[in-house]
Image (cartoon, grey):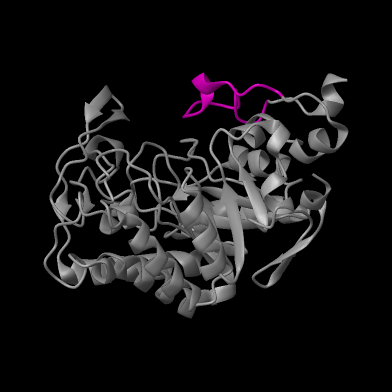
């Protein structure tokens, strides 16, 4: 495990260790999307890790899908995130804000504007989501016009600039987990007949153009992307050509010289090996459900440059201290994951307060 505690280079930065905090929706922003003081405290508590990837943050009004998620496109959003970035930097860590457009994984009741969700095609995900009145079906979205696709790319670009204005060290594009970019990749969600639908090259185009636009705006070495090959959830089915799509997509993204690729790995070992060869920059690997005794194995094996963890860091603000001391971990309280107060957010005890 020792190698995971060593410094590494990521884009233009040197990180103090090879552990990243994975982005996790916590639904504790103000209704209009501004992160509050508790958010700054939450991330600062966890800044022992070399890189903090903040929760999915909408780049526009139409990018919001869930209640009380943060945005990064207004002056108030920027001011709120500035407190977060200052707090994280004071602890010697780096902060990338994840730009997440929910696409069809949204409900009008969850947003201030109450508009219909947007997506590549007018196909409902066939899933339910939490709303102020309980669980409801995610409705059929409105298909984006080609012109609106182009505007959405610009929304991502502007949001990335605003993230840098807020003091973030960079942005991670959310291209995973059944949200908008992933919807473009999957033929089950994308039946378009323009240049963004059909062939692999067309379905990958939106992701590539978003990454290129952001890299041109803030620098490739401050731009990153997260992918989840093979994730079939919420109506997403990448089809038999899914692995070929990701080989093409990663090869094209690699040409941009981005800071890192954050890969959610779901067991396709051959594809992982190919991506490791295709991708020449830093690779962050996340294996959902990975046991504690395997922490550091992927870095030691050369499969990844960093490893990211979610729930374990959520419940253990002093994650690195506990790892180094081989101390027990706090258990995460699932009932407090989404929404609420400091309970299950900033009140997880550090080792120094429990011993």
Decide if residue 91 is in sight here: no
Image height check: is 123 above or below 215? above
Decide if residue 49 is in sight here: yes
Q: On the rendered image, what quadrant is the C terminus found in?
A: top right
Q: Is residue 175 left or right of residue 28?
A: left
Residues in magenta, as a range: 330-347
Task: Indicate the position of residue 260 as horizontal and vertical percent values.
Answer: 57, 64
Pick the residue in front: 182 or 352.
182
Task: Indicate the position of residue 14 as horizontal and vertical percent values.
Answer: 75, 66
Task: Indicate the position of residue 152 as horizontal and vertical percent values.
Answer: 29, 65
Identify the residue at horizontal 65%, vertical 43% (top origin): 43
Pick the residue in front: 266 or 103.
266
Q: Is residue 345 magenta?
A: yes
Task: Indicate the position of residue 139 as horizontal and vertical percent values.
Answer: 17, 38
Identify the residue at horizontal 24%, vertical 40% (top origin): 235
What is the number of callouts on the image?
0
Q: Is residue 32 magenta?
A: no
Identify the residue at horizontal 78%, vertical 29% (top origin): 350
Residue 39's image quarter? top right
Q: Is residue 93 left or right of residue 164?
A: right
**Residue, far front:** 270
Q: Is residue 1 left or right of residue 245?
A: right
Q: Is residue 283 left or right of residue 322?
A: left
Image height check: is 198 above or below 183? below
| Main secondary structure of the magenta stretch | loop
Residue 236's image quarter? top left
Residue 187's image quarter? bottom left
Q: On the rendered image, what quadrant is the N terminus found in?
A: top right
């Amino acid at each position: 495990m020792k190698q995971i505690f060593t410094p590494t280079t990521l884009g233009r930065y040197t990180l103090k260790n090879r552990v990243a905090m994975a982005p996790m929706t916590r639904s504790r922003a103000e209704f209009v999307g501004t992160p509050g003081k508790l958010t700054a405290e939450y991330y600062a508590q966890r800044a022992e890790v070399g890189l903090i990837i903040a929760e999915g943050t909408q780049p526009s009004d139409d990018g919001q899908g869930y209640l009380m998620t943060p945005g990064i496109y207004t002056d108030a959003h920027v001011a709120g995130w500035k407190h977060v970035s200052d707090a994280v930097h004071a602890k010697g860590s780096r902060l990338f804000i994840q730009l997440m457009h929910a696409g069809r994984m949204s409900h009008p009741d969850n947003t201030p504007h109450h508009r219909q969700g947007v997506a590549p095609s007018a196909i409902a995900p066939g899933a339910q989501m939490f709303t102020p009145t309980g669980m409801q079906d995610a409705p059929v979205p409105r298909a984006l016009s080609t012109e609106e696709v182009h505007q959405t790319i610009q929304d991502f670009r502007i949001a990335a600039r605003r993230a840098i204005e807020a003091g973030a060290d960079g942005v991670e594009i959310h291209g995973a987990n059944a949200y908008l970019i992933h919807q473009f990749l999957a033929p089950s969600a994308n039946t378009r007949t323009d240049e963004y639908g059909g062939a692999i090259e067309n379905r990958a185009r939106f992701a590539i153009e978003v990454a290129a636009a952001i890299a041109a705006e803030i620098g490739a070495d401050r731009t990153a992307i997260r992918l989840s090959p093979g994730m079939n959830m919420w109506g997403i089915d990448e089809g038999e050509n899914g692995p070929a799509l990701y080989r093409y997509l990663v090869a094209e993204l690699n040409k941009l010289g981005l800071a890192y690729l954050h890969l959610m790995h779901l067991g396709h070992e051959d594809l992982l090996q190919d991506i490791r060869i295709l991708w020449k920059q830093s690779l962050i690997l996340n294996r959902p459900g990975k046991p504690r005794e395997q922490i550091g194995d992927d870095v030691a094996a050369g499969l990844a440059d960093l490893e990211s963890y979610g729930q374990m860091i959520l419940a253990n603000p002093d994650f690195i201290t506990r790892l180094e001391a081989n101390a027990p971990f706090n258990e995460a309280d699932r009932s407090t994951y989404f929404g609420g107060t400091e309970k299950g957010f900033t009140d997880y005890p550090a080792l120094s307060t429990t011993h």
